[in-house]
Image (tube, grey):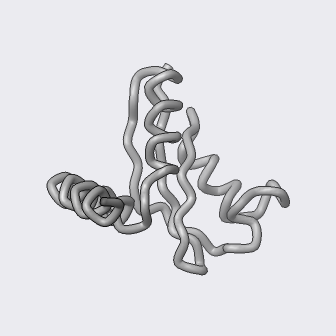
Amino acid sequence: MPYALYILKCSDGTYHTGMTTELDARVQEHQTGAHPDAYTFHRRPVQLVWSEIVESYQEAFQWEHQIKGWSKAKKEALIRGDIEGTHEIVKAEREEKN
């Protein structure tokens, strides 16, 4: 069963990353505040800014947790489709740590 990974931009400028089998329905749940304990509940409205379909739960789970650990700048590079930019950001982040 295919899974959709997604990134939502929240009204406060933060990003929420998730995965689902029903992208449109899940985005609608975030938009309407269907889950009061969700990160996005007090950050509505939200906007779907990126999504990708993968073939397995395991792949979606790994990607979701990887992206959640990324900096805001790296997420924004992914949203722009700037794969080279994500590599440059990682390089800069590593240099800052040293």
* Of residues 4 and 63, the one drawn nearer to the viewer in this rendering: 63
Where is 90 relative to 60, above or below? below
* Of residues 55 and 25, the one drawn nearer to the viewer in this rendering: 55
Q: Which quadrant of the figure contains the C terminus?
A: bottom left
Left or right: residue 16 versus residue 55 is: right
Where is 51 relative to 96, above or below? above
| The furthest residue to the right | 36
Where is 59 relative to 11, above or below? above
Q: Position of residue 26 (x, y in %)?
A: 63, 48
| The furthest residue to the front | 98
| The furthest residue to the bottom | 12
* Of residues 1 and 77, the one drawn nearer to the viewer in this rendering: 77
Left or right: residue 38 versus residue 80 is: right
> How many numbered marks appear?
0
> Going 48% across and 56% down the picture, which residue do you hit?
7
> Going 59% across and 78% down the picture, which residue do you hit?
11
Q: Position of residue 82 (x, y in %)?
A: 20, 59
Where is 34 relative to 3, above or below? below
* Of residues 62 and 52, the one drawn nearer to the viewer in this rendering: 62
> Going 39% across and 55% down the picture, which residue do you hit?
50
Left or right: residue 66 versus residue 79 is: right
Q: Position of residue 44 (x, y in %)?
A: 67, 73
Q: Quadrant of residue 97?
A: bottom left
> Going 41% across and 22% down the picture, which residue do you hit?
55
Q: Position of residue 37 (x, y in %)?
A: 83, 57
| The furthest residue to the left | 84
